[in-house]
Image (spheres, rainbow, N blue to C red):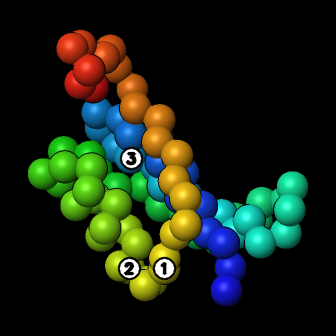
Amino acid sequence: MARNILAVDLGGTKTHLQIYDAEIPDRLRLVREGILPSSQYSGLEVLVNEFLQMKGEEISAACFGVSGPVVNGHA
């Protein structure tokens, strides 16, 4: 089973998502990528779940980049 990593760049307008296979140490292979309109989702969890369910992929790790300022612990 491949070790998949989800990379997410969350923006106010659109969210870029990529899944990488990290089964081979020190080498990432892009499996799939997509762009979804951020404003059409009620939250990050809904957006990510929809992206993953498109192909039924599972991930073992994730990294999120969020644009904008953080105020009182919220972006």
Q: In which quarter of the image is residue 35?
A: bottom left
Marks 3/1: CA distance? Answer: 18 Å
Q: How crowded is mark 1: few (under 14 residues within 10 Å), some or many (20 or more)?
A: few
Three-letter amino acid code at the position of disc 2 = Met
Helix, strand or loop at disc 2? Answer: loop
Looking at the image, residue 56 lies above or below residue 67:
below
Disc 3: which residue: 15
Looking at the image, residue 49 lies above or below residue 66:
below
Marks 2/1: CA distance? Answer: 8 Å
Q: Residues within 10 Å of mark 2 (few under 14, many from 20)?
A: few
Three-letter amino acid code at the position of disc 3 = Thr
Question: Are the residues tagged 2 and 1 within 8 Å (C-beta)?
Answer: no
Q: What's the residue at 36%, 35% (across, down)?
A: 11
Q: What's the residue at 49%, 76% (across, down)?
A: 58
- Closer to us: 49 or 25: 25
Question: Are the residues tagged 2 and 3 within 8 Å (C-beta)?
Answer: no
Disc 2: which residue: 54
Marks 2/3: CA distance? Answer: 15 Å
Image quadrant in which the C terminus is located: top left
Task: Determine if residue 25 is in view.
Answer: yes
From the image, state whether disc 2 or disc 1 is nearer to you: 1
> Horizontal and vertical percent for residue 46?
22, 61
Q: What's the residue at 47%, 35% (across, down)?
A: 65
Image quadrant in which the N terminus is located: bottom right
Question: Are the residues tagged 3 and 1 within 8 Å (C-beta)?
Answer: no
Disc 1: which residue: 57
- Label for residue 70? none
> Horizontal and vertical percent for residue 52?
40, 72
Task: Determine if residue 40 is in view.
Answer: no
Three-letter amino acid code at the position of disc 1 = Glu
